Amino acid sequence: MGIYLPIAEMSVNMVVILAMGAAVGFLSGMFGVGGGFLITPLLIFYNIPPAIAVATGANQVVASSVSGALAHLKKGTIDFKLGTVLLIGGIAGSTLGAWVFALLRSVGQLDLFVSLVYVALLGTVGGLMLVESVRALQRARRGVNPIARQTGQHNWIHRLPFKMRFRASKMFVSVIPVVGIGAVIGFLASIMGVGGGFIMIPALIYLLKVPTNVVVGTSLYQIIFTAAYTTIVHSTANQTVDIVLAFLLMVGGVAGAQYGARAGQKLRGEQLRALLALLVLAVALRLAFDLFVRPSSVYSLTGL
Amino acid sequence: MMRLAANRLSLALLISAWCMAPTLAQAPTDVTPESIQIGLSTDRVTITSDFSGADLTIFGALDNADPMVARQGRYDVIVVLEGPARPVVVRKKTRVLGMWINTESETFVNVPMSYSVATSRARQDITNPANYKQLALGAENITVTPFDRNGDPVTIEEFTTALRERKKASGLFSERIGGVQFLSQSLFRATLHLAPNVPVGTHRARAFLFKNGVFIKENSAQLAILKAGFEQRVHRAAQNHGFLYGVVAVLLAFVTGWLGRLIFRKD
């Protein structure tokens, strides 16, 4: 069933796009991430121009994070103050990202940069998660209890000035790393068309020592607004948000996410993390393949 | 939608061509040169949300056709549908540090976004390559002007070839041998393919008449390819009111996310 995309100016199969949204939604619901890192590459593999895939991906991330954050709002597992400080950094990073995005597009290196950032980040995060989860699985098999993380453990981040108290997270920490993490993720989000949950969650846990129970909710809360801002910036500066494409992805995505969340409850934490790591690595490898293997044609056309 | 019927114009031409025939026979010494007419059944094609490519049928007629030549099938017609011209950047990837990276590029200022050809016979059987070149007829002969006119001619040649090859690969440059069929001695029908990614804008249909391998006459008609109401409004909104468009896209995402949670929630 063909549907014409008014911004991408091409006809796509509606069922394929809905299924793509549902599959990514299912996985994102299962693993508690936004799924932007899957949607954008999938759209690019489906011949959607990268600039439109990135901006439209950000738009669909808004829907999936609203859906996810509502569940956390009900459970009270969102640290609004922490989320808002992260957001201030996020907005700054996102603005810079959209500017770099337009610059790279004009010199023809956008595709390369997007692919490189994806390969580097997904490869690193996926690799680390795989190692960590395999160790956890081995420990579980040997019957050893995982070592509980020591609370009150301090690193260099806790020695920085401008400290602020975050009650919901039971933290007293400098705003510099919080704004910094927000800015880096906002920058990446706007270039990659992702919410950045797969980087935000490890950063909050390992760098800021935010308690695990508030991490996902807070991350989703701030991603809603970073992704919304990214969408508006891309729409204003580059006119690359395809609302028809985004809507199809959202519908598939929010439906898939709720089923995925239920499926996720049946798996153990470390099994889930190992699976997610494999998925992330698979996407990274697929993108690396395109980067390192001779393309079928070395020439490409773009409009001016 | 375009196939429905021969339009009134081409029917009228058909009748006029028939009426001409006796006149010609009576005065064989004073031969009026042949000419070609084409008529589109519509001057606009709208791209609706279910558009996935289409066939466009163009009817045409020969005026003052010599019945003898026509009977021997020595008239040939080539119909071209040429899309709007826009600037295009052709980039070339080379291997840098093991990665395939865009390193060279060449900008062309007036590339037809699409170019589909229908012919009555295989191209080489109609006339010789020199004639095609002179008429700038066929994907390999259309003129594209590089932005940098003083560039290295070898590089420009290389990128021009790549441009045509990429356009062919994307289905925007196409050729259909036998796409032009004679329905009678002077009436013909050309079927051209509109790709799913056909560019919107003003397209020009051109018909070329050949007799015994000699180019006789050309005629053209315009066709507007437009997005239908909703698609057009969305596109215009994105172009003219980018900020508001973005806000609406975000609100839509909020509502979809919220409704999705209400409808599909499993916890």
Image (spheres, rainbow, N blue to C red):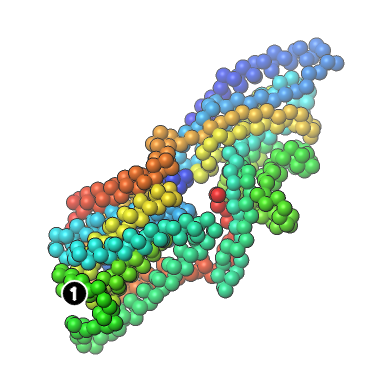
Mark 1: which amino acid?
Met
Image height check: is A111 above or below B257?
Answer: below
Q: Position of residue A264 (x, y in %)?
A: 24, 67
Q: Chain of mark 1?
A: A
Which quadrant would residue B64 be assigned to in this image? top right
> Compared to A274, does A63 lie above or below?
above
Choose top left, top right, bottom left or bottom right for residue A85. bottom left
Query: Which residue is disc 1 drawn over?
Result: A171
Q: Could you tell me which quadrant the C terminus of chain B lies in?
A: bottom left
Q: Is residue B196 left or right of residue A179?
A: right
**Left or right of residue B129: residue A23:** left
Q: Nearer the viewer, residue B254 or B161?
A: B254
**At x 67% / y 49%, what residue is drawn?**
B146
The residue depicted at 63 percent of the width and 46 percent of the height is B109
Q: What number of labels is visible? A: 1
Instruction: Estimate the x, y position of residue A74 in percent, counting from the top left.
Output: 14, 59
- Callout 1: 10 Å neighbours few (<14), some, many (20+)? some
Residue furthest toward the front? A162
Q: Which x, y percent locates residue A253?
A: 30, 55
Regarding mark 1 in the picture, which secondary structure is present there? strand
